Image (cartoon, grey):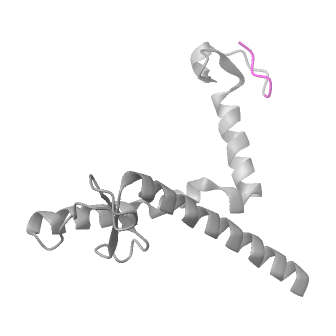
Amino acid sequence: MTCSICGKRLRRGNYYGRADGSVRRVCKACERGRVREWRREHPELDRAKDRRKAPRFLAARRAVARAIARGELERPERCERCGKRGPVEAHHEDYGKPLDVTWLCPGCHRQRHQERARTIRIGKWLNFEIAEVAG
């Protein structure tokens, strides 16, 4: 196959695959360069920087698990939001406060994260609009 960007003839293994089994026409090296350039040009949309929260996220999960094992924290039988009986998950509003959790059923937990993401997006939009009007 020939890369449509660099023009090199490479084996199929040098191209990223698609879900349908076909492969892209751009080699892996050119695709990585394209993504790197896009991230540099669009830092506000780069999700890779969001991965930096992962260590705090994992530390908060471990702290909750240890606290439950030691008996310092108890997992309730009901969701604190809807009252549904069944498995509940620990939700952190702030990963810096690992034992400050709200116990939510999976449905309410997913909904809470969606609400939080919507609030963040709206907040960024409003800040942008306000800065533009003031400037």
Q: Quadrant of residue 71?
A: bottom left
The quadrant the N terminus occupies is top right
Residue 106, percent across and down?
Answer: 38, 52
Please give the name of the residue rendered at 40% of the width and 66% of the height, measured from the top-left corner. 81
Horizontally, residue 63 falls left or right of residue 32, namely left
Is residue 61 found inside the magenta-colored segment of the image? Answer: no
Please give the name of the residue rendered at 27% of the width and 61% of the height, measured from the top-left corner. 78
Does residue 73 appear in the picture of this structure?
Answer: yes
Horizontally, residue 83 falls left or right of residue 30, namely left
Residue nearest the observer in this picture, 34 or 129: 129
The quadrant the C terminus occupies is bottom right
Residue 38, percent across and down?
Answer: 74, 49
Q: Quadrant of residue 126?
A: bottom right
Which contiguous range is marked in magenta?
1-5
Q: Quadrant of residue 66?
A: bottom left
Relative to 7, residue 106 above or below: below
Residue nearest the observer in this picture, 29 or 25: 25
Query: Looking at the magenta stretch, what is its main secondary structure?
Result: loop
Does residue 135 appear in the picture of this structure?
Answer: no
Residue nearest the observer in this picture, 18 or 14: 18
Relative to 67, residue 34 above or below: above
Residue 130, percent across and down?
Answer: 82, 81
Please give the name of the residue rendered at 55% of the width and 58% of the height, measured from the top-left corner. 114
Residue 117, percent across and down?
Answer: 59, 62
Is residue 2 found inside the magenta-colored segment of the image? Answer: yes
Horizontally, residue 122 falls left or right of residue 73, namely right
Residue nearest the observer in this picture, 67 or 12: 67
Please give the name of the residue rendered at 24% of the width and 66% of the height, measured from the top-left corner. 64
Relative to 27, residue 81 above or below: below
